[in-house]
C-alpha cells in the first residue's frame, strides 16, 4: 500500500512571489495608493488566519483607511491575477520541482493537493506544469471550513487507501491544519522569504518534523520517518 503525500500549492509546488504576492501588492496599491512590502505581507501570513489572499488584501486596504467592499477587492484582484488569459499574473508562477522529482515520489506515494486556491485555479497551474499527477486536488471551494481547519486533509485521507501520510506546506495555517488532522507536517521556508528565520522558527514551533528550503529535498527528509 502506498503512502500519501499531500501538498499545499502556493510557496510549495510553485513560487508565487510574482503572482499571488504581487497581486496583493498591486491590489492594495490600486485602492489606497500605498503598496505594501513583501515583508508586511509575510508578517500577516506568519500570524496565521490569513490564508485567503482576497481577505488579506481587503484587510490591508481597510487598515489603510479605505473601506472598499470585499466583493470589489475580489473582482479587481481576479482581473489582475487572470488577465485575459495571456497576461495575468498567474502566468508569472515558477514551478519549483526539478525534473523527475514527482515521477520518483509517485512510484512510492499517492500524490494529492490541498490548497487555499479555488480548485479550478489550482488546476490551471497544475495543467500548465505537471498535468494528471495529483489526485485528488482539493481547493477552498471543496470544503466548508478552510485552513487552518483540517477538513480538506480529512477529505483527502478518507478518499484513498494509504499507509503513512504527510502534509507539506509553507504557512502557520498549513502546520495547524496538519496538527489538527494528526498527520506529520513538513514545512517549506524558501531562502528568499523576507522573514525566513522567523518562518522557520514558527513552523518548527507549530510541530513540523522537518523544515526544508524547497520540495527538492523532500525525498531525503521523509526517508528517516517512513
Image (cartoon, rainbow, N blue to C red):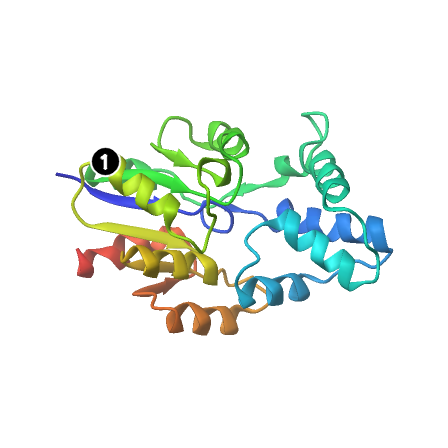
Residue 210 against residue 197 in the figure, above or below: above
Q: Residue furthest left?
A: 1
> Which image quarter is the C terminus in?
bottom left
80 lies above or below 173: above
| Res 84 quadrant in image | top right
Give the left or right position of residue 56, taking residue 3 as reference: right
Residue denoted by label 1: 160
Residue 216 horizontal/vertical position (percent): 37, 51
What x and y, as percent, mark residue 183? 27, 56
Number of numbered discs: 1
22 and 53: which is toward the camera: 53
Q: Is residue 132 left or right of residue 91?
A: left
- Residue at x 34% of width, y 65% of height: 208
Identify which residue is drawn at 26% across, 35% down: 159
77 relative to 167 in the view: left or right: right
Which residue occupies 33% across, 52% down?
A: 167
When asked about the image quadrant of residue 209, the answer is bottom left
Depth check, front residue: 156 or 194: 156
- Residue 9 location (% of width, % of height): 47, 45
Q: Dividing the image into 4 quarters, which one contains the N terminus?
A: top left
Which element is circle 1 on? Answer: loop
Amino acid at each position: 500500500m502506498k503512502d500519501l503525500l499531500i501538498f499545499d500549492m502556493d510557496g510549495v509546488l510553485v513560487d508565487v512571489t510574482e503572482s499571488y504576492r504581487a497581486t496583493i501588492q498591486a491590489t492594495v496599491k490600486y485602492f489606497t495608493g500605498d503598496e505594501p512590502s513583501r515583508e508586511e505581507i509575510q508578517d500577516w501570513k506568519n500570524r496565521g488566519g490569513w490564508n485567503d489572499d482576497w481577505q488579506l488584501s481587503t484587510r490591508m486596504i481597510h487598515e489603510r483607511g479605505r473601506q472598499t467592499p470585499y466583493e470589489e477587492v475580489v473582482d479587481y484582484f481576479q482581473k489582475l491575477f487572470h488577465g485575459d488569459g495571456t497576461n495575468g499574473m498567474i502566468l508569472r508562477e515558477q514551478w519549483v520541482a526539478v525534473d523527475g522529482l514527482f515521477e520518483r515520489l509517485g512510484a512510492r506515494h499517492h500524490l494529492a493537493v490541498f490548497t487555499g486556491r479555488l480548485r479550478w485555479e489550482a488546476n490551471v497551474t497544475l495543467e500548465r506544469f505537471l498535468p494528471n499527477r495529483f489526485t485528488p486536488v482539493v481547493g477552498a471551494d471543496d470544503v466548508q471550513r478552510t485552513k487552518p481547519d483540517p477538513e480538506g486533509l480529512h477529505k483527502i485521507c478518507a478518499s484513498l487507501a494509504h499507509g503513512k501520510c504527510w502534509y507539506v506546506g509553507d504557512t502557520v495555517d498549513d502546520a495547524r491544519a496538519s496538527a489538527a488532522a494528526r498527520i506529520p507536517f513538513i514545512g517549506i521556508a524558501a531562502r528568499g522569504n523576507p522573514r525566513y528565520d522567523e518562518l522557520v522558527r514558527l513552523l518548527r514551533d507549530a510541530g513540523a518534523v522537518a523544515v526544508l528550503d524547497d520540495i527538492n529535498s523532500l525525498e531525503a527528509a521523509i526517508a528517516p520517518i517512513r
